[in-house]
Amino acid sequence: MDESMVQRVVDELDILRLLAAVAQSADDGDEVAYRTCFADEVLCYNRATLEEREWRYVSSRDYARRSITSASDIDWTRHRIGNTIVILDGDRATARADVVVEMQSSDEAAKPHNLFLTDGISLPATE
């Protein structure tokens, strides 16, 4: 295997590990570990206006805090990532994956309620 192919495999594995780290740190409720998965600024939906088509940059600190805090009332979560597609193009890469999140919360009587959410995540081109 030539050196460029080895580098391509290493790069793709790094991206897959990053996706796994995002999921695991979210499941663990580990804000610090979650934050390390992102650049200093994160492009995300502007939830303040609930306009899904409106995007804005927020600091990774604010994004991590908001993300981890939003699940603080949940007993537990388990993210499952599959159908991951990584496209490498020189020094740039994009990734897309399907995500299923299983979570459990309890009501006042401590009766558990399970919920499944599905979504896709995309990692925009990075260098």
Image (spheres, rainbow, N blue to C red):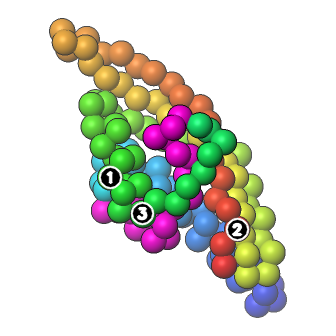
Within the magenta stretch, is there residue 113?
Answer: no
**Where does label 1 land, which residue?**
65
Mark 3: secondary structure: helix
At label 2, counting other C-alpha atoms closer than 10 Å, the crowd grade (few under 14, some 14-19, many 20 or more) is few
Percent position of residue 20, x then y: 51, 56
Q: Label 1 is placed on what type of residue? A: Arg
Which range of residues does the magenta coloring cover? 32-50
Which quarter of the rendered picture does the N terminus lie within?
bottom right
- Return the residue nearer the eye: 21 or 122: 122
Residue at the (66%, 79%) spot, across then down: 127
Q: Are marks 2 and 1 in contact (CB under 8 Å)?
A: no
Query: Which residue ends up furthest to the bottom in the rendered image?
Result: 3
From the image, tell me which residue sits under label 3: 60
Residue 114 visible from this viewpoint: yes
Q: Nearer the viewer, residue 105 or 39?
A: 39
Q: Which residue is mark 2?
A: 125
Number of the front mark, 3 or 2: 3
Q: CA distance from mark 1 to mark 3?
A: 8 Å
Q: Is residue 46 left or right of residue 109?
A: right
Amino acid on which the number 3 mark rests in the picture? Ser
Amino acid under disc 2: Ala
Cα gap from disc 3 to disc 2, whole angstroms = 17 Å
Q: Residue at x 25, y 14 (%)?
A: 107
Q: Please name the residue shown 67% across and 62% down the image.
A: 124
> Which label's residue is closer to the chain start, 2 or 1?
1
- Give x and y (percent) for residue 65: 32, 52
1 or 3: tag closer to the N-terminus: 3
* Secondary structure of residue under mark 2: strand
Give the mark, 3 or 2, whose residue is nearer the N terminus: 3
